[in-house]
Amino acid sequence: MEVNFWGTVYCTKYALPEILKTKGSIVGVSSIAGYKGLPGRSGYSASKFAMNGFLDALRVENLKTGVHVLTACPGFTASNIRNTALDKTGAEQGESTLHEEKMMTADEVAAIIADGVENRSRTLIMTGQGKLTVFLSKFLPGLLDKLVYNNFAKEKNSLLSQK
């Protein structure tokens, strides 16, 4: 919450006077976890839901100011963040259970966000899986719950049991 939500709020608060003058952009790097709560990542999901709500309100508040607000959701990105995630015992997870080589790189994500700023996009959902998740969360939320549960239950040392 300190980094994902409050970091976004405070950076925006202090940059906003200049952004208003230049009719610039505010970019929040969120996550699909801000659209669908993910098991074992409840704190992360809550911080991204909060960020999405903040950016959405900020967008409406600045509708007539010329300020552009972009919410970017890269999906899984190759990084070491999962190495420091906690497992069900509260210990560091260690090596990721996900296939990092199949994920977007940070450079790819940055290029997509730069294009989104240039095009003044509202939201960027950068993966097919992410787009499907957002769609299902709106129209078939019960089905999405089951799909997410089944997917996360398959993780190594999952917090979920397959019953």
Image (cartoon, rainbow, N blue to C red):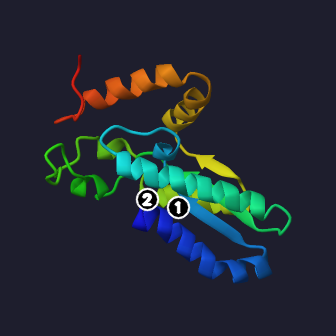
Task: Residue 132: give x, y in percent of width and height.
Answer: 55, 30
- Check disc 2 and report the residue beneath it: 106
Q: Tell me if mark 2 has few (under 14), some (14-19) or many (20+) residues whose alpha carbon lies within 10 angstroms of its own.
A: few
Q: Is residue 92 above or below residue 141?
A: below
Q: Residue at x 39, y 52 (%)?
A: 44
Q: Are marks 1 and 2 in contact (CB under 8 Å)?
A: yes
Left or right, 108 with reference to 139: left
Q: Residue at x 39, y 39 (%)?
A: 38
- Check disc 1 and report the residue beneath it: 110
Q: Which quadrant holds residue 120?
A: bottom right
Q: Is residue 132 above or below residue 49?
A: above
Identity, as a three-letter code, of the amino acid under mark 1: Ala
Mark 1: which secondary structure? Answer: helix
- Distance between the Cα atoms at labels 1 and 2? 6 Å
Quadrant including the C terminus: top left
Q: Is residue 84 above or below residue 65?
A: above
Task: Residue 65: give x, y in percent of width and height.
Answer: 83, 69
Q: Could one spot residue 86 in this view of the protein?
A: yes
Q: Residue at x 44, y 50 (%)?
A: 46
Q: Residue at x 72, y 59 (%)?
A: 59
Identity, as a three-letter code, of the amino acid under mark 2: Ala
Quadrant including the N terminus: bottom left
Q: Could one spot residue 30 in this view of the protein?
A: no
Task: Residue 124: give x, y in percent of width and height.
Answer: 61, 49
Q: Residue furthest top?
A: 163
Q: Which quadrant holds residue 117?
A: bottom right
Q: Is residue 27 above or below residue 82?
A: below
Mark 2: which secondary structure? Answer: helix
Q: Tell me if mark 1 has few (under 14), some (14-19) or many (20+) residues whose alpha carbon lies within 10 angstroms of its own.
A: few
- Residue closest to the eye, 26 or 52: 52
- Residue closest to the eye, 56 or 32: 56
